[in-house]
Amino acid sequence: MHNISAYGLSKPKQTTIRKIKSSTGKYFFEYQIPNLNIIGTKILKWMSFVQKFRPIKFSIPPKLDKEFPVDELVSKLTSRTEIPIFLPSNIDFSRRDLAISANADGYSIGIYAAPPSSGIGSRSTASYYGAISVYRIRTSFKSGNKRIEDEDSTSTLRNIQLDNGIAATYSSICGAYCMAQVEWKYQGFQYIVSQKGGRQRELVQIANSMISAGSRQDSQGKY
């Protein structure tokens, strides 16, 4: 909101209270905000005024609350790649759409939030939830982890430690939305876990779950 003086004892002013950008790059939708005080009928007028506005919906994926389909994914990946398959034992999510890609050099599982009215999602940036990628270092494998390219973005980068003393890196970059990821290297492979709007604690839990479970092709293939 702008023009705080409009809330004082001055006359009502045109104030931009909803920032919507037009194709020309200018803001529009200006509303007249009445003076706010505690006498007469001003409070009732103010309440009537603010009730005109509807809540703004954000494109944050819904909370996920079902088990990660590990067996299903292992079955699909083992027929497409021979590299070790590391998956977390559990990522909570309900409606989901999984985009799987794999070849001799790696695999990636993109996770999208599917609309309530359909069985699959649009696989757009708005419905993107996160990704798990594993690939050989020094290859051209393209992971499904999305990155933000925005000149006005802000970023965070720090070294962290996962279970079993494994060194990793946590990074977060925010532009139109925030994308966070944890990545580490092990025995010639690069591991990346990313999540839209994710927090370090959540990503570390997923990474540690992958480490604890070990290679899914070998029940003894722990770190």
Image (cartoon, helix red, strand yellow):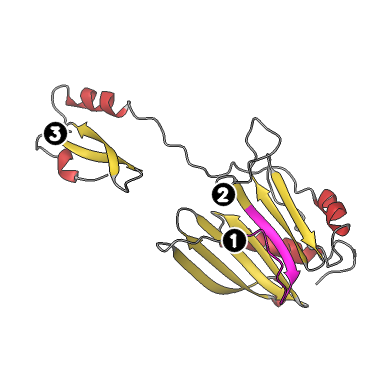
Question: What is the secondary structure assignment of the residue under circle 2?
Answer: loop
Q: Quadrant of the C terminus?
A: bottom right
Three-letter code for the amino acid on which mark 3 is drawn: Pro
Quickly name the residue at label 1: 201
The answer to which image quadrant residue 134 occupies is bottom right
The residue indicated by pointer 3 is: 12
Q: Is residue 222 left or right of residue 91?
A: right
Instruction: Determine contact: label 2, label 3, CB under 8 Å.
Output: no
Residue at (42% x, 36% y) in the render: 56
- State which quadrant residue 11 falls in: top left
Number of other residues with Cα within 10 Å of mark 3, as a class: few under 14, some 14 to 19, many 20 or more: some
Residue 111 picture location, percent across and down? 67, 50
Q: Please indicate whether residue 2 sits to the left or right of residue 106 in the image.
A: left
Residues at badges 2 and 1 in contact (C-beta under 8 Å)? no
**Residue 140 falls within the magenta-colored stretch:** yes
Residue 155, how many percent across, how many down?
47, 66
Q: Is residue 11 above or below residue 2?
A: above
Q: Earlier in the sequence, mark 1 or mark 3?
A: 3
Looking at the picture, which amino acid does disc 2 mark?
Thr
- SS label for mark 1: helix
Which of discs 2 and 1 lies nearer the camera? The answer is: 2
Q: Residues within 10 Å of mark 2 (few under 14, many from 20)?
A: few
| Residue marked by disc 2 | 125
Q: Quadrant of residue 1?
A: top left
Labels 2 and 1: the sequence-earlier one: 2
Q: Which residues are magenta?
A: 130-146
Residue type at mark 1? Arg
